[in-house]
Image: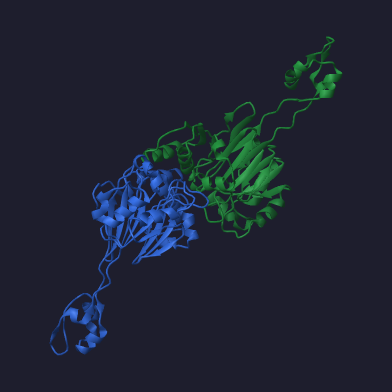
Chain colours: A blue, B green
Amino acid sequence: MELTILGCYSATPKPKTHPTSQVLSIKNHLFLIDCGEGTQVQLRRCKVNFSRIKHIFISHLHGDHYFGLIGLISTFMLLGREAELNIYGPKGMKEVIMLQLKLGKAWFNYPLNFHELVCKESEVIFEDDKVTVITVPLKHRVYTNGFVFKEKLGERKINIEAVKDNNIDMSYLQKIKQGKDIENNDGKLILNKQITFDPEKPKSYAFCSDTQYYPACIPTIKNVTALYHESSFLDEHEYLCAKTRHSTARQAALIAKEATVDRLILGHYSTRYSSIDKFKTEAKQVFHNVELAEDGKKFII
Amino acid sequence: MELTILGCYSATPKPKTHPTSQVLSIKNHLFLIDCGEGTQVQLRRCKVNFSRIKHIFISHLHGDHYFGLIGLISTFMLLGREAELNIYGPKGMKEVIMLQLKLGKAWFNYPLNFHELVCKESEVIFEDDKVTVITVPLKHRVYTNGFVFKEKLGERKINIEAVKDNNIDMSYLQKIKQGKDIENNDGKLILNKQITFDPEKPKSYAFCSDTQYYPACIPTIKNVTALYHESSFLDEHEYLCAKTRHSTARQAALIAKEATVDRLILGHYSTRYSSIDKFKTEAKQVFHNVELAEDGKKFII
């Protein structure tokens, strides 16, 4: 899994700070998560092959998380895209996009599928043979979901020496990977665990932004490999959290700790701070493995 | 008058090319003309004091001319703007903006006035004691207007030597500027033209983008000081104009010539060209005074 941060600042775009957007490369997918104004330019700047994006996940309908969506959709049209595009996000999103396409008399050269979310409980919104995506209901000023992107348990890994030693026909390799026990050339049943290793532990990534400190989300993100959690403020501005429904770095770390995640990535910084170093300092007082998102930075998960 | 080009490329924003937006400083006004995605960042980059913008003119509802508008409106809210904002543009614009503000549960801290345009004839859409703005109906794939920004004829300039020589009381200076004839201290009527100079010739700026070659606009832009006319294509791609309803540089120059403008500024270049020099070369074969818009460039008019 590789996560590319296109933008990780709150509020509005500036020459050096970009609003929320990130790309998650997971199995054969390239998922776009949120799409603030200027995302299409950041995709180009970060050299993402954005024609490969087939699924876009929008957390909520504040501008710094989706004002770049209509531009990206339009650019896909101009570029002659034919592959379908799926967009998952709050109800209302479809009306905004379709109205703008209608006013611009835009033509359609690819299927645009909206999956509007209204549920207040976590739900599966995407699934194939390798990946599952579920929502993480969050608490913000408007209806908001985070998302967990989970790899499925992969095939078992073949212990080729053990296969040979047990006189097994090589035509069974696919079945062995699938976990089947096999009858060998001598007619003896060989148990799968004798000739395979466990698959790699599936990885998972949770995106939680924007939200106030909201421990109710912990069961949904429990034990993820990496958690991106918004941290708009430092401790000194914690008093702003109640009104704006955002979190501090320390609160993000509390969520990470309780959810026993492997690592915490902080982002969605208020642009009032001239340096983001203190976000890490304050979060590390609560949770050991903290990293800072930065525009253009990549994380291997 | 000073014109700042924020973006002058067609299609979608890229790291080095910005879609249409420009700022016209005229008398005490700072007018924003079109507002493609990323305009608010370009305003910051070009160090425009954008809180002074009170009037925004949108030519048409294609994304590269207005997708940045909702972001700018939202930023004004975040910055605590209180001054009213007037937006002039095609019908439909208000619905798009209000829908997005409603979905984001945005609060209003300043009056937002929409002036939706539907007229197919040129009309006055703004006027005060120093400036008039009229529409220039254009021909594009959707309903489109250009705009002419005209200074009004200023007050007459006082010839202070002549005023003294004619024994005129200094309390009449304001009336003299207004063009009045004055009775001097000896009871003699002094004609205004004896004691004043003509005011400076009023300047005017016409913005015409997007449009196909459309000579019907010429009477409306006749004799302007500067004309910005779109030139999406070079001669070699003239065949694309009919379908896309854009112009070549040569066609823009033909309009400039027929309208007997003082100078022509080209822009709205297709991003297919690696250099824009040829736009000037081709236009100059038709019209003598051609300049090229470039992102970030300023023109004193």
Say if B293 sits above or below B113 in the image. Answer: below
Residue at 59% of width from left, 45% of height from top?
Answer: B47
Q: Quadrant of the C terminus of chain A?
A: bottom left
Q: Is residue A146 left or right of residue B152?
A: left
Say if B110 sits above or below A95 in the image. Answer: above
Residue B162 x %, y %:
84, 22
Q: Is residue B139 left or right of residue A167?
A: right
Residue at 30% of width from left, 65% of height from top?
Answer: A203
Q: Is residue B28 left or right of residue A48?
A: right
Q: Quadrant of residue B264?
A: top right
Residue A76 x %, y %:
44, 56
In the rendered image, is residue B210 in sight? Answer: no
Residue A241 x %, y %:
36, 43
Of residue B100 and residue A212, the one placed in the foreground of this image is A212
Q: Quadrant of the N terminus of chain A?
A: bottom left
Q: Residue furthest front?
A: A285
In the rendered image, is residue B300 in sight? Answer: yes
Of residue A241 and residue A89, the one placed in the foreground of this image is A241
Q: Is residue B15 left or right of residue A69?
A: right
